[in-house]
């Protein structure tokens, strides 16, 4: 998990948000809206959908493109629990909440990094023969 979180406001333009994400090499930003019940998230995918629809990134606001139906993680979740939640939901970022506050953002990249640094391997078995995972 990255404890350093890019935070943007709902009034930022998509271009401002994308610029900040690119500068920090992150794929998501937490959105704090004082009028919302909790944090939101905007991802690179949300920005790409807007661009693909022909919308102007200089006038479109973050608030209009937030990811809906958020799943929040707890610091106690295992990597497997987080990966399963991401796979079920079809998303690549989880906001981690601890004691009601944003503790960080966990990305698929973070999970892969942990598994690879720990020496995790994956070997598939096909009809009794070991086959390297593709």
Image (cartoon, grey):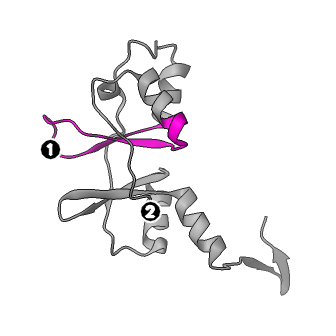
> Is residue 76 shown left or right of residue 28?
left
The tag earlier along the polypeptide, 1 or 2, is 2
Q: Position of residue 76 (x, y in %)?
A: 33, 75
Screen quadrant of the C terminus: bottom right
Q: Which residue is mark 1?
A: 37
Residue drawn 37% across and 29% down?
65
Q: Secondary structure at mark 2?
A: loop
Magenta stretch holds residue 30: yes
Whether 34 is drawn above or below 113: the answer is above
Marks 1 and 2 sit apart, C-alpha to C-alpha, by: 23 Å
| Residue depicted at x 75% and y 79% | 123
* Residue for point 53% across, 61% down: 110
Which region of the structure is painted magenta? Answer: 21-43
Could you say where residue 118 lies in the image, as x and y percent from the top left?
Answer: 62, 79
Tag 2 residue: 1
Say which residue appears at 27% left-offset and 29% top-offset: 10
Asked whether, in this view, residue 21 is left or right of residue 109, the answer is: left
């Amino acid at each position: 998990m990255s404890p350093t979180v890019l935070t943007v406001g709902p009034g930022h333009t998509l271009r401002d948000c994308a610029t900040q994400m690119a500068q920090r090499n992150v794929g998501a930003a937490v959105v704090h809206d004082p009028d919302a019940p909790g944090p939101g998230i905007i991802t690179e995918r949300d920005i790409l959908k807007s661009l693909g629809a022909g919308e102007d990134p200089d006038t479109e606001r973050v608030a209009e493109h937030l990811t809906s139906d958020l799943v929040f993680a707890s610091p106690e979740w295992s990597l497997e629990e987080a990966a399963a939640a991401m796979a079920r939901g079809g998303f690549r970022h989880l906001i981690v909440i601890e004691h009601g506050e944003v503790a960080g953002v966990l990305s698929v990249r973070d999970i892969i990094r942990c598994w690879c640094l720990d020496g995790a391997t994956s070997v598939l078995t096909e009809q009794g023969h070991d086959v390297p995972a593709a």
